[in-house]
Image: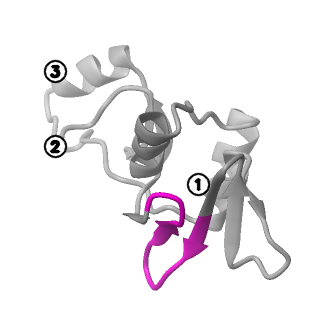
Amino acid sequence: MAPRPNRYYYIRHQPTLLTEELLKTVQHAPDPAAALPQPIRLTKHWLAAFGFLPDATATSWSLEDARLVNGMNCWLCVTTRKYLQFVHELQDHFEEYFHLHLQLLKPNSYLARIA
């Protein structure tokens, strides 16, 4: 699946919000493979950055009506029974199912810490 704008990807080893303009720049780069957006593994740090809150045991994370449970190498959305591995998959799923656009609470501070 092709990278979509308004999603977070690694670009040149940095977590970056892929804007329409940046996507065009990457596609027309002299060496597009070097700047190709790479998926970011979904972690507890990313969930916290989007505003998810852990339960008392930190095995389940919730945001509004959604609850994610940590699996072996993925997260399960309990409501929809969808497995999620990457940040952009979480963003896609929340827009499609919950009609919610996920945004980082404090983008600059979280991206510096997550990177």
At 45% from the left and 58% from the top, the residue drawn is 80
Give the residues drawn in magenta, as a range.
68-80
Q: Secondary structure at mark 3?
A: loop
- Taking the image as shown, residue 99 lies to the left or right of residue 56, namely left
Q: Residues within 10 Å of mark 2 (few under 14, many from 20)?
A: few
Confirm or deny contact between disc 3 and disc 1 (CB under 8 A): no
Q: Which residue is mark 1?
A: 115
Q: Please, what is the three-letter code of the amino acid marked with disc 3?
A: His
Measure the alpha-carbon separation of dots 2 and 1: 21 Å
Q: Residues within 10 Å of mark 3 (few under 14, many from 20)?
A: few
- Taking the image as shown, residue 52 lies to the left or right of residue 6, namely right
- 74 in magenta: yes
> Looking at the picture, does residue 69 appear above or below residue 84?
below
Q: Please, what is the three-letter code of the amino acid marked with disc 2?
A: Ala
Q: Please, what is the three-letter code of the amino acid marked with disc 1?
A: Ala
> Looking at the picture, does residue 77 appear above or below residue 9?
below
Residue sitting nearer the eye, 95 or 86: 95
At 68% from the left and 35% from the top, the residue drawn is 107
Q: Earlier in the sequence, mark 3 or mark 2?
A: 3
Q: Secondary structure at mark 2?
A: loop
Q: Which residue is mark 2?
A: 33
Counting from the top left corner in percent of width and height, residue 10 is at 41, 47
At 85% from the left and 77% from the top, the residue drawn is 56
At 71% from the left and 46% from the top, the residue drawn is 64
In the drawing, what numbered circle is on residue 28? Answer: 3
Q: Is residue 110 visible?
A: yes
Counting from the top left corner in percent of width and height, residue 58 is at 75, 76
